[in-house]
Image: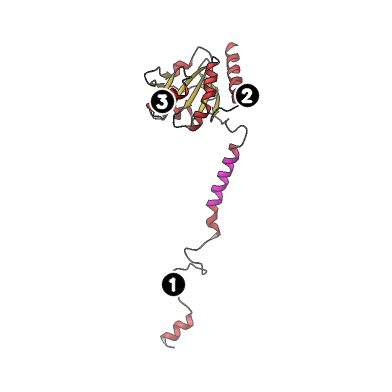
Protein backbone atom coordinates (compact mmCIF):
# COMPACT_ATOMS: atom_id res chain seq x y z
CA UNK A 1 0.00 0.00 0.00
CA UNK A 2 1.35 3.41 -0.95
CA UNK A 3 1.97 6.16 1.57
CA UNK A 4 -1.03 8.08 0.22
CA UNK A 5 -3.33 5.10 0.53
CA UNK A 6 -2.12 4.47 4.11
CA UNK A 7 -3.03 8.05 5.15
CA UNK A 8 -6.49 7.75 3.60
CA UNK A 9 -7.16 4.49 5.39
CA UNK A 10 -6.25 5.96 8.74
CA UNK A 11 -8.80 8.77 8.35
CA UNK A 12 -8.30 12.50 8.85
CA UNK A 13 -5.40 13.45 11.11
CA UNK A 14 -6.03 15.18 14.46
CA UNK A 15 -5.13 18.84 14.11
CA UNK A 16 -4.06 19.38 17.71
CA UNK A 17 -6.90 21.85 18.32
CA UNK A 18 -9.22 19.07 19.41
CA UNK A 19 -9.24 17.24 22.70
CA UNK A 20 -9.96 13.52 23.10
CA UNK A 21 -13.53 12.73 22.13
CA UNK A 22 -13.54 15.33 19.41
CA UNK A 23 -14.16 18.38 21.63
CA UNK A 24 -12.07 21.44 20.88
CA UNK A 25 -9.56 22.34 23.55
CA UNK A 26 -11.01 25.83 23.89
CA UNK A 27 -14.61 24.65 23.69
CA UNK A 28 -17.37 24.79 26.28
CA UNK A 29 -17.64 22.14 28.97
CA UNK A 30 -20.51 22.00 31.51
CA UNK A 31 -18.15 21.72 34.46
CA UNK A 32 -16.88 25.21 33.67
CA UNK A 33 -20.16 26.55 35.13
CA UNK A 34 -19.46 25.15 38.60
CA UNK A 35 -17.33 28.08 39.91
CA UNK A 36 -19.78 30.59 38.43
CA UNK A 37 -22.77 28.88 40.03
CA UNK A 38 -20.96 28.75 43.36
CA UNK A 39 -20.19 32.46 43.23
CA UNK A 40 -23.81 33.19 42.34
CA UNK A 41 -25.01 31.17 45.34
CA UNK A 42 -22.73 33.09 47.72
CA UNK A 43 -23.85 36.44 46.28
CA UNK A 44 -27.52 35.46 46.55
CA UNK A 45 -27.09 34.49 50.19
CA UNK A 46 -25.39 37.81 50.92
CA UNK A 47 -28.12 39.84 49.21
CA UNK A 48 -30.84 37.95 51.00
CA UNK A 49 -29.07 38.68 54.27
CA UNK A 50 -29.14 42.38 53.52
CA UNK A 51 -32.89 42.22 53.30
CA UNK A 52 -33.33 40.66 56.72
CA UNK A 53 -34.68 42.82 59.50
CA UNK A 54 -31.70 41.90 61.66
CA UNK A 55 -29.07 42.33 58.94
CA UNK A 56 -27.36 45.02 61.02
CA UNK A 57 -27.02 42.72 64.02
CA UNK A 58 -23.85 40.79 63.29
CA UNK A 59 -22.05 38.60 65.79
CA UNK A 60 -19.11 40.11 67.61
CA UNK A 61 -16.54 38.37 69.76
CA UNK A 62 -16.34 41.54 71.87
CA UNK A 63 -19.95 41.63 73.12
CA UNK A 64 -19.96 41.66 76.94
CA UNK A 65 -16.19 41.98 76.90
CA UNK A 66 -13.90 44.96 77.54
CA UNK A 67 -13.34 47.32 74.65
CA UNK A 68 -9.86 46.87 73.11
CA UNK A 69 -6.98 48.91 74.43
CA UNK A 70 -6.33 51.93 72.22
CA UNK A 71 -5.17 55.52 72.43
CA UNK A 72 -5.87 57.73 69.43
CA UNK A 73 -4.92 61.36 68.78
CA UNK A 74 -7.63 63.98 68.46
CA UNK A 75 -8.99 65.62 65.33
CA UNK A 76 -8.03 69.18 64.46
CA UNK A 77 -6.48 69.85 67.87
CA UNK A 78 -9.44 68.45 69.82
CA UNK A 79 -9.31 65.81 72.54
CA UNK A 80 -8.39 62.31 71.42
CA UNK A 81 -9.99 59.05 72.47
CA UNK A 82 -8.59 56.15 74.47
CA UNK A 83 -10.07 53.14 76.20
CA UNK A 84 -9.67 54.94 79.51
CA UNK A 85 -12.25 57.48 78.32
CA UNK A 86 -14.84 54.71 78.06
CA UNK A 87 -14.57 53.68 81.71
CA UNK A 88 -16.73 55.44 84.29
CA UNK A 89 -19.24 58.23 83.77
CA UNK A 90 -22.16 56.10 82.60
CA UNK A 91 -23.05 54.46 79.31
CA UNK A 92 -21.46 55.79 76.14
CA UNK A 93 -21.82 55.39 72.40
CA UNK A 94 -18.84 54.93 70.10
CA UNK A 95 -19.62 55.78 66.48
CA UNK A 96 -17.07 54.78 63.82
CA UNK A 97 -17.38 57.05 60.79
CA UNK A 98 -15.56 58.70 57.88
CA UNK A 99 -16.15 61.71 55.66
CA UNK A 100 -15.94 59.52 52.51
CA UNK A 101 -18.71 57.26 53.83
CA UNK A 102 -22.06 58.14 52.23
CA UNK A 103 -24.15 56.16 54.78
CA UNK A 104 -22.35 58.08 57.56
CA UNK A 105 -23.78 61.29 56.15
CA UNK A 106 -27.26 59.73 56.09
CA UNK A 107 -27.10 58.57 59.71
CA UNK A 108 -25.48 61.75 61.09
CA UNK A 109 -28.77 63.43 62.11
CA UNK A 110 -29.55 60.43 64.33
CA UNK A 111 -26.13 60.65 65.98
CA UNK A 112 -26.73 64.36 66.59
CA UNK A 113 -30.17 63.63 68.03
CA UNK A 114 -28.74 61.11 70.49
CA UNK A 115 -26.13 63.63 71.61
CA UNK A 116 -28.78 66.34 71.92
CA UNK A 117 -30.78 64.05 74.22
CA UNK A 118 -27.83 63.94 76.61
CA UNK A 119 -26.16 60.69 75.57
CA UNK A 120 -22.38 60.76 75.44
CA UNK A 121 -21.22 59.98 71.92
CA UNK A 122 -17.56 59.48 71.07
CA UNK A 123 -16.31 59.12 67.51
CA UNK A 124 -13.55 57.13 65.85
CA UNK A 125 -12.68 58.68 62.51
CA UNK A 126 -11.73 55.72 60.33
CA UNK A 127 -9.15 55.76 57.51
CA UNK A 128 -9.87 59.39 56.70
CA UNK A 129 -8.00 62.54 55.83
CA UNK A 130 -8.14 64.88 58.86
CA UNK A 131 -9.01 67.92 56.76
CA UNK A 132 -11.89 66.06 55.12
CA UNK A 133 -13.16 64.83 58.47
CA UNK A 134 -13.05 68.36 59.87
CA UNK A 135 -14.93 69.64 56.84
CA UNK A 136 -17.60 66.95 57.29
CA UNK A 137 -18.23 68.08 60.87
CA UNK A 138 -18.13 71.77 59.98
CA UNK A 139 -20.87 71.15 57.42
CA UNK A 140 -23.10 68.74 59.36
CA UNK A 141 -22.33 69.50 63.00
CA UNK A 142 -20.17 67.84 65.62
CA UNK A 143 -22.08 65.62 68.08
CA UNK A 144 -18.94 63.96 69.49
CA UNK A 145 -17.56 64.57 72.96
CA UNK A 146 -14.25 63.11 71.87
CA UNK A 147 -12.90 61.98 68.50
CA UNK A 148 -10.03 59.57 67.97
CA UNK A 149 -8.30 59.62 64.58
CA UNK A 150 -7.71 56.07 63.34
CA UNK A 151 -5.94 57.03 60.14
CA UNK A 152 -4.35 53.60 59.62
CA UNK A 153 -7.48 51.62 60.52
CA UNK A 154 -5.57 49.58 63.11
CA UNK A 155 -8.00 50.33 65.95
CA UNK A 156 -10.96 49.54 63.69
CA UNK A 157 -9.47 46.10 63.08
CA UNK A 158 -9.15 45.56 66.84
CA UNK A 159 -12.83 46.47 67.24
CA UNK A 160 -13.75 44.00 64.49
CA UNK A 161 -15.14 46.65 62.17
CA UNK A 162 -16.63 45.30 58.92
CA UNK A 163 -17.08 48.76 57.47
CA UNK A 164 -18.28 52.20 58.42
CA UNK A 165 -20.51 53.27 59.94
CA UNK A 166 -20.72 51.12 63.03
CA UNK A 167 -21.98 52.14 66.45
CA UNK A 168 -21.24 50.49 69.79
CA UNK A 169 -22.91 50.83 73.17
CA UNK A 170 -20.31 50.69 75.94
CA UNK A 171 -21.27 50.35 79.59
CA UNK A 172 -19.72 52.27 82.48
CA UNK A 173 -17.17 49.53 82.98
CA UNK A 174 -15.84 49.94 79.45
CA UNK A 175 -17.49 46.76 78.15
CA UNK A 176 -19.12 46.54 74.72
CA UNK A 177 -22.75 45.51 75.20
CA UNK A 178 -24.27 46.20 71.77
CA UNK A 179 -23.06 46.61 68.21
CA UNK A 180 -24.99 48.22 65.36
CA UNK A 181 -23.53 47.58 61.92
CA UNK A 182 -24.42 50.01 59.15
CA UNK A 183 -26.16 53.37 59.31
CA UNK A 184 -28.66 54.06 62.08
CA UNK A 185 -32.03 54.53 60.40
CA UNK A 186 -35.58 55.44 61.38
CA UNK A 187 -36.71 53.08 64.13
CA UNK A 188 -33.23 51.90 65.09
CA UNK A 189 -32.90 54.45 67.90
CA UNK A 190 -36.14 53.48 69.64
CA UNK A 191 -36.00 49.76 68.88
CA UNK A 192 -32.33 49.00 69.39
CA UNK A 193 -30.02 51.80 70.50
CA UNK A 194 -32.04 53.21 73.41
CA UNK A 195 -33.03 49.78 74.78
CA UNK A 196 -29.35 48.78 74.75
CA UNK A 197 -28.40 51.99 76.56
CA UNK A 198 -31.17 51.53 79.14
CA UNK A 199 -30.25 47.89 79.75
CA UNK A 200 -26.60 48.78 80.24
CA UNK A 201 -27.50 51.60 82.61
CA UNK A 202 -29.80 49.34 84.63
CA UNK A 203 -27.14 46.63 84.85
CA UNK A 204 -24.63 49.18 86.08
CA UNK A 205 -27.03 50.39 88.76
CA UNK A 206 -27.48 46.89 90.22
Mark 2 sits on what residue?
A: 191
Specify the quadrant that holds the C terminus. top right
Residue at the image position 59 percent from the left and 38 percent from the top: 49
State the residue in front, 85 or 109. Answer: 109
The residue most toward the front is 139
Can I make out residue 188 in this image? yes
Q: Quadrant of residue 195?
A: top right
Residue at the image position 55 percent from the left and 49 percent from the top: 38
Mark 1 sits on what residue?
A: 15
Total numbered badges shown on the rendered structure: 3
Q: Position of residue 203 (x, y in %)?
A: 59, 15
Residue at the image position 54 percent from the left and 20 percent from the top: 113
Please say whether residue 153 is one of the residues in the magenta stretch.
no
Residue at the image position 53 percent from the left and 51 percent from the top: 36
Q: Please identify, in this view, whether the residue under mark 1 or under mark 3 is nearer the observer.
A: 3
Q: Which residues are magenta?
A: 35-48
Marker disc for residue 135? 3
Q: Position of residue 27 (x, y in %)?
A: 50, 63
State the residue in front, 112 or 197. Answer: 112
Amino acid sequence: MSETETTRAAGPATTGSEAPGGAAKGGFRPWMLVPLLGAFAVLSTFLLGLGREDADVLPSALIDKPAPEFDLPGLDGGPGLARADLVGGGVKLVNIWASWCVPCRAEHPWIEALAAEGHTVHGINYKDQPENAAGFLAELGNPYTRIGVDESGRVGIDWGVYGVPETYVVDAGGNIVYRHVGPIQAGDVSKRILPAIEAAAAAGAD
